[in-house]
Amino acid sequence: MQTVNPLTMYVPIYQTADAQAIAQSVAENFNNELTKAALDKMAIVHYARIACVPNSNGEGIAGVLVITEFDGNMNSYLEAFYKNSPTIKTAFIGLIGLWANKPEGFPTNPDDITFDIFSNFINDRNISQPKELYFAYPQSVKQIVAKFSK
């Protein structure tokens, strides 16, 4: 079984000034102490980053790209965010709020986002497959931290 798996999630966003500003702020402020503490506590994320994808004309942001590599399977990864990491769950639900292609009837109230809606949203936007990921080592985050934090 593959020990490390990828998430490369692309979310096209509204082309409004507010959505553009929020996306830019999310990308610029992602790597902070609160996010680091939440990801460290989960102890399954190897790397995580957010990038804004520019519109083809070079003006504004077409969408947000979330890229992570993590231990375990996708479902356990998403459950960890949804059930055990309010900080990261809130960030993902914030991206749902910016999503320009919501189907009719999709919940807009964050309190109405169930785990099924949350996980389907992420899985449907994931453009990576485990077989596409090169990884140089088989150790988990917990194993690596235990070995090198002494």
Image (tube, grey):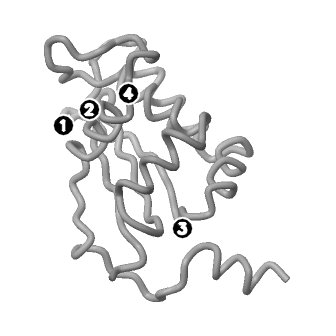
Residue visible at 43% across and 65% down in the picture:
69
Q: Which secondary structure lies at badge 4? A: loop
Inter-mark Cα distance, 4 to 2:
27 Å
* Rendered view: 112 above or below 141: above
| Of residues 47 and 28, the one drawn nearer to the viewer in this rendering | 47
Q: Look at the image and tell me in which quarter the C terminus lies.
A: bottom right
* Image position, residue 132 (x, y; %): 23, 73
Distance from Cα at disc 4 to Cα at disc 1: 34 Å
The residue under label 4 is which amino acid type?
Thr
Disc with the residue nearer the chain's start (3 vs 4): 3
Residue 122 appears at what percent x and percent y? 31, 42
Residue 128: name its quadrant.
Answer: bottom left
Q: Which residue is mark 1?
A: 56
Q: Are marks 2 and 1 in contact (CB under 8 Å)?
A: yes
Near mark 4 (Cα within 10 A), the count class, few <14, some 14-19 or many ≥20, is few
Amino acid type of the residue tagged 3 in the rendering: His
How far separated are the C-alphas under marks 3 and 4? 26 Å
- Element type where label 1 sits in the image: loop
Residue 114: which numbered mark, if any? 4
**Mark 3: secondary structure:** strand
Q: Which badge, 4 or 2, is on the more N-terminal residue?
A: 2
Image coordinates of residue 114 in percent, x first then y, are 37, 27
| For residue 112, above or below residue 147 | above
State the separation of the CA atoms marked 2 and 1.
8 Å
Number of marks present in the image shown: 4
Q: Which residue is mark 3?
A: 46
Confirm or deny contact between disc 1 and disc 3 (CB under 8 A).
no
Q: Amino acid at mark 1?
A: Ser
Residue 62, label in figure: 2
